[in-house]
Amino acid sequence: MASVARWRAGLWLLAAILTSSGGVSAPAAEFKSGSWAGRDIKGSDGIFKGCQIDSTHPGDRILGFGIFVPGIFQVRVSDKAWTFEPGALPVTLWVDSGEKLSGNAVAAAKTTVVVPINQGGKAFAEALQKGNILHVTVPTGALDFKLSGTFKAIGELERCWNDGVATLPKAAGAAPQAGAPQGAAQAAAPQVKRVKGADLLGLSLPEFAAQVVTLQDNGFFKLERASKQQLEQLSAGLVWTMKGGFGFVTSVNTDPDVQLLKDSLVKQKTPRCKGELSGSADVRSLPGTAIQVKRVELRCTDVGNGDAVTEVFAFYPHLSGQLVGISHIAKDRKVAVAADGEFAKRVAAILQAK
C-alpha cells in the first residue's frame, strides 16, 4: 500500500471544508443494493466528486466503499468502540486468504478509518466482490466483515461512478477510471529550473512553490499531481504534502494590512467551521533578508466530524507588487506551523543564494 501521503482522501475532505468555495452539500442521488445504501457526492456547485456505499454489521460496525476523483478506490471502516486520534495509523487488509495490503491509513474521525488504495484499487474491489470475508487489523485489534451482497453493491458503486464522471466538465480532463493510478487526468507539476535571489519573487505561482518545495530532497515536502478539478476547488496553482498534512499556493492578491487579511479569512471560513473558529495574525521578517511575510493562523475546533484543523497562511511579496498566498493545513497544529516554518526557511535560502 501507499504511504499516508498518498492515502490523502481524508485530508482532501478537510481541505475542501476549510478552503473551497463551497462544502460538499448539494443534494445526493441515493441508491440501494440489498442491505447496502449508497449515494453520490457533489459539491455545492453541483460538480460530481465521487460515490460511496456502506452497510451496517453486527456490533454497530459499518463497512463502506467509495470511489473519489481522480478515481481512487477506498475502504471505510467504523467501530463505535474505537477512540483513535486524528491522523495516520497502520492498517492491514486482506480478503479470505489473499494477499495482505499493509500501510498507513487515515483516522478520519475517532471511530472511523479511511483506507484509500492508490495502486491496485480495481483489483482489490474485484476481490471484495468475489470474496467471503474482509479481514482488517488496526492497532486495537482485528475485525472481520462478512462480504454479503458486495458483488452487486460494488457494481452499483461503479455504475454511480461512471454516471458521475460523465457529468464532469471537460476542463477537468479525461474521465478517470475507477481504481486507476493517478496519471493522465491529473495536472503535472511544473519542471523546476533553478533560480536564485530576487528572481524567485517574479515567478508564476506554480513555479514559485515548486522552487521552494523541491529545494531540498529530504522528504519534508512532496509534490503531488492533482486533478484540474481539485486545483480549481482549492483555487490552487500547485499542491504538495508533508507528513500529516498538505499545502498549496493559492493566488496573487492585493496587499492589504495583515489584520484585514485575517478578518477577511475569518469571514470566509466561519460558515465552514461547525465548532469555534479562532485566529491570530502577525508580520515576520525572513532571516537574513529584508522581506516581510504576513501570517494568519486559523483554528477550527470542529470541521463537521469532530476533528479540529489548523490552517496557516503566509503571504509573500511578489515583484508585481502583490502577494503570493501559501497555505499549510493539518489536524495537528504543530504540523501546520512546522511546515510554514520550513517553507519560510527555504524561501530565505533561495533569496540569499548567489
Image (cartoon, helix red, strand yellow):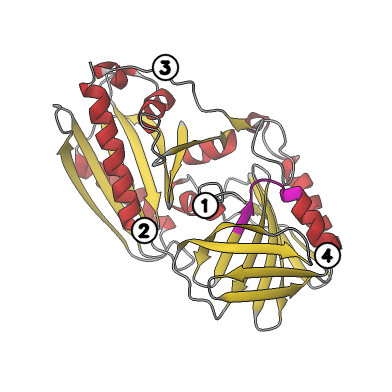
Give the mark toward the camera: 3 or 2. 3
Work out whether residue 122 or residue 45 is closer to the camera in this orientation and state it. Answer: 122
Q: How far apart are marks 1 and 2 (CA)?
A: 15 Å
Please say if 303 is above or below 248: below
Give the mark toward the camera: 2 or 4. 4
Q: How far apart are marks 2 and 4 (CA)?
A: 38 Å
Q: What element carries label 4?
A: loop
Which residue matches tag 1? 4
**Which residue appears at 20% of the width and 44% of the height?**
259
Q: What stretch is highlighted in magenta?
A: 115-122
Q: Distance between the residues labelled 1 and 3?
A: 29 Å
Q: What element carries label 2?
A: loop
Residue 235 seen by the camera: no
Which residue matches tag 2? 332
Q: What element carries label 3?
A: loop
Image spot of residue 87 (x, y percent): 46, 60
Residue 131 bears which disc, if any?
4
Please state which amino acid type lies under the numbered disc 3.
Answer: Lys
Question: Which of marks 2 and 1 precedes in the sequence?
Answer: 1
Please state which amino acid type lies under the numbered disc 4.
Answer: Gly
Image spot of residue 166 (x, y percent): 76, 39
Please say if 132 is above or below 47: below
**Which residue appears at 77% of the width and 55% of the height?**
125
Q: In this view, does 151 lie to the left or right of 62?
A: right
Quadrant of the image for the C terminus?
top left
Q: How far apart are marks 4 and 3 (CA)?
A: 50 Å
Q: 10 Å neighbourhood of mark 2: few (<14), some, or many (≥20)?
A: some
Which residue matches tag 3? 193
Q: Is residue 156 left or right of residue 292?
A: right
Q: How far apart are marks 4 and 1 (CA)?
A: 26 Å
Question: Which of marks 3 and 4 precedes in the sequence?
Answer: 4
